[in-house]
Amino acid sequence: MRPQKEFPLLDDFKKRFKVTEDTIFAYDHVIYTNNELPDHLVMHELTHHFQQDEHGLDTWVYNYLNDPKFRLEMEVEAYRKQLAHIQDPKGKAITLMVSAKDLSSELYDNLVTYKEALNLLK
């Protein structure tokens, strides 16, 4: 893991999304974050690494930045793997609500409504 400020595409992502000090980036087998991450969140970011390998790094980044349908598909997969990694039912329920809130926010360019996000992640 490296600090968020070292993320090589930080300016590109800031132009497209509402990036905060807490935003996490997965890129080229490195996780860029300003915080320590729980295991389930690491699983989410590792999923993006696998996706980047599958699609090709440059293709994945281009599509993630420019294709809302692709971005939604990538995030739903990552959130589902993150949620599957949580064993505690209460923790899973809380993370589901937080994840749906994030997925339906400016963080991902308001891809879906909160209700749609909940349905996609269940």
Image (tube, helix red, strand yellow):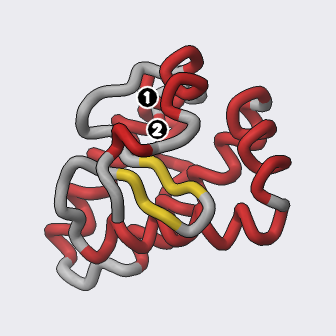
Q: Disc number at residue 103?
A: 2
The CA span between labels 2 and 1 is 7 Å
Q: Position of residue 110 (x, y in %)?
A: 52, 22
The crowd level at tag 2 (other Cα within 10 Å; few <14, some 14-19, many 20+) is: many
Pick the front one: 43 or 117? 43
Identify the amino acid type marked 1.
Leu
Residue drawn at (54%, 37%), measured in percent from left and top?
116
Q: Relative to 20, is 87 above or below?
A: below
Q: How many marks?
A: 2
Residue furthest to the bottom in view is 87
Q: Which residue lies at the image location 72% right of the left edge and 43% below the top edge?
A: 61
Residue 19 drawn at (x, y percent) = 38, 26
Could you tell me which residue is drawn at 26 percent across and 57 percent down? 95
Q: Dot 1, how many residues are within 10 Å of its Cα: few (below 14), some (14-19), or many (20+)?
A: some
**Quarter where residue 57 is shown:** bottom right
Q: Position of residue 100 (x, y in %)?
A: 40, 43
Q: CB under 8 Å between callouts 2 and 1?
A: yes
Residue designated by label 1: 107
Give x and y (percent) for residue 1.
35, 65
Q: Residue furthest top?
A: 15
- Res. 23 visible in picture: yes
Amino acid type at image mark 2: Leu
Camera-side residue of 34 and 121: 34
Query: Residue at horizontal 70%, vertical 50%?
Result: 73
* Circle 2 SS class: helix
Please determine whether, in this image, residue 112 is positioned above or below residue 45. above
